[in-house]
Image (spheres, rainbow, N blue to C red):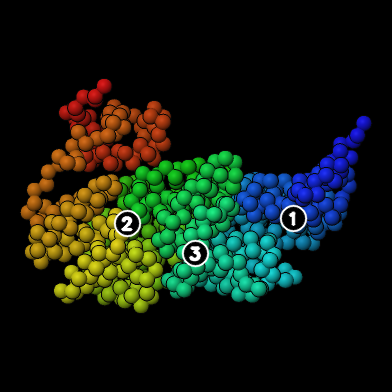
Amino acid sequence: MISVARAHRVLAGRLADQPERQVWHLAEAAVEPDERVAALLQGVAHANLRRGGGVGAISELLRAAELSPVGSDRASRMAEAAYLGSIVTGDLSEAPRLLEAARQADPEHGGSLAAAVAGAYHLLNSDGDVDTAHRLMTGAIETLPDPGDAHDKVLIEGLYTLLLVCFFGGRAYLWGPFDTAIGRLTPRPPELLAILGKTFSDPVRLAPPALGRLDAAIARLSRETIPARIVRTGIAAAYLDRLTGCRAALWRVVQDGRAGGAITSAIEALFLLGNDAFFTGQWEQVTQVTEEGLMLCQTHDYRLLAWPGIFLQALLAAARGDQDTTEALAVRMAGWATPRGVRSVQNYAWHVLAIAALGRADFEDAYRHAAAVSPAGVLASHVPHALWLIMDLVEAAVRSGRHAEAAAHVAAVSEAGIAGISPRLAMITHGSAAMACADETYGDLFETALAIPGAERWPFDQARIQLAYGERLRRVKATTAARTHLAAARDTFQRLGAQPWTTRAGNELRATGLTLGHAHAEGPASLTPQQRQIARLAAVGLTNKQIGERLYLSPRTVSTHLHQLFPKLGVTTRAALRDALADLPPEQP
């Protein structure tokens, strides 16, 4: 009777034209360590990874480690499996065991850089220890025999991880070792890593020369199959308003994750989609994708990766006037980030608090929070988030009487050439300049901002500029023109559910002498069928959680609907719902 091992050897001999299948059979035939087979199997794992097969690659690396006759090789393959589990499949729980096995196989090195990558991910997602993760990564890179080998896959993955550490740290000096490491790669850095090193680290100063390369990378996404490459392209595009071009590819990553593929990439893709959805006015989708992403973070214990999703939920709550949620999430972000030195998450908290303060016309508070991210007159080095607070800082400065600070910030934005990065940033640049303008040329600046091609693609930003323009026109008694812009702003804010901004625009319209009706977008008849159900259940005392369980919605989605329907019914509390619903027309069968 033929043995199993011999059967695998026979099959391997017949598969010379299918090298990957041949290697698997050779591995199954091996009954003792065999470095030749181990190395071949490791190569198969790398090929599998390049195709997006992270789960299979881990299995292949673990088998290659078993077949490794030398402790250092075994340790390296164990550590590589650990870091793939950490950054691809979402299996952080296995990393400590695999790293310990690597240390036992090679006590002196323990897998070296691959172990450092896995260790850094574990540190970031357990304690959020950015500084230790940074020291771990930079130390491991510097001890490599050849830290300039651009073909060293582990080194390149290590640099992607170091980039993540530097971003979350949010301090300019952290990027020095990354820049040094990129600069010595020969023959040249991988194209995507080189792009990220410019567009994501310090986009104000480094992105403009790389925009053509980024656009070319986005154009190639239709043919890209590797989830990590798709997500990294999306990350490179995030602060430069190019995520819309990545959406189809990002959704493929999400579907891959749902089917058991790369979980980490799926989480990042969901939050990138949420990012784009917020800026393009698809606010219901923000809630949907962030809830799914945060659920995956909780399931797989990805604490650090959860913060972008929490930020997006807080930003949406701030724009819609949900003060309780905004403050709770901002306190949560700041409370976690401040003691750990995770400056980017602290910036998230300041951003949402600035938006909330602007909505309620608390311009002193808005200025304080916006200036904490980057001071007036400065676009702070290696703080990409400063690009998202340009108009917030200028508006808050103008409305709080800080005209010199507003002018200084407009000048800094102009000098940096921010308008050339994207049409949205061009609109923001001209809109901010108009807000800060002290003479009669403000009208030309507002008109230029609103005439940017495709301005309607960013409805919240566009409506804020229309609101500011309408306010300015009303003050100089240009009543007809003021009403045109204020009405357009109010309609957009109302459609988005941005209640504080709807109120601000409505108050300005009333100040022009216009009497506002509620027939077209307010009143009980304007409720959707789902909003009717939610309103009735809330009126009888059910909590958001209980309503969600009954209607198969999340509590946060229920909260969003309530904040949308309150202004339609002319109420501000749940207690007032019962009376407001008394005149509700009967539902159609």
Q: Position of residue 62 (x, y in %)?
A: 75, 48
Label 2 neighbourhood size at 10 Å, few (<14), some (14-19), many (20+)? Answer: some
Question: Which numbered marker is on residue 458?
Answer: 2
- Cα distance, mark 3 to mark 1? 29 Å
Q: Position of residue 584 (x, y in %)?
A: 19, 29
| Disc 3 and disc 1 in contact, CB within 8 angstroms | no
Q: Residue at x 28, y 31 (%)?
A: 529
Under tag 2, what secondary structure? loop
Q: Is residue 45 left or right of residue 546?
A: right
Kindly identify the residue that appears in the image at 63 percent across and 52 percent down: 51
Disc 1 versus disc 2: distance between alpha carbons?
Answer: 46 Å
Q: Disc 3 to disc 2, how far (Cα)?
A: 23 Å
The quarter of the displayed image where residue 567 is located: top left
**Residue type at numbered disc 2:** Trp
Neighbour class for label 1 at 10 Å: few (<14), some, many (≥20)? some
The circle on residue 216 is 3
Instruction: Choose mark 3 or mark 1, whichever is in front.
Output: 3
- 355 to 55, vertically: above or below: below
Q: Amino acid at mark 1?
A: Gly
- Tags 3 and 2 touching, CB below 8 Å: no
Residue wearing tag 1: 43
Q: Is residue 475 above or below residue 21?
A: below
Which is more foreground, mark 3 or mark 2?
Answer: 3
Q: Earlier in the sequence, mark 3 or mark 2?
A: 3
Asked if residue 99 shows in the view, the reply is no
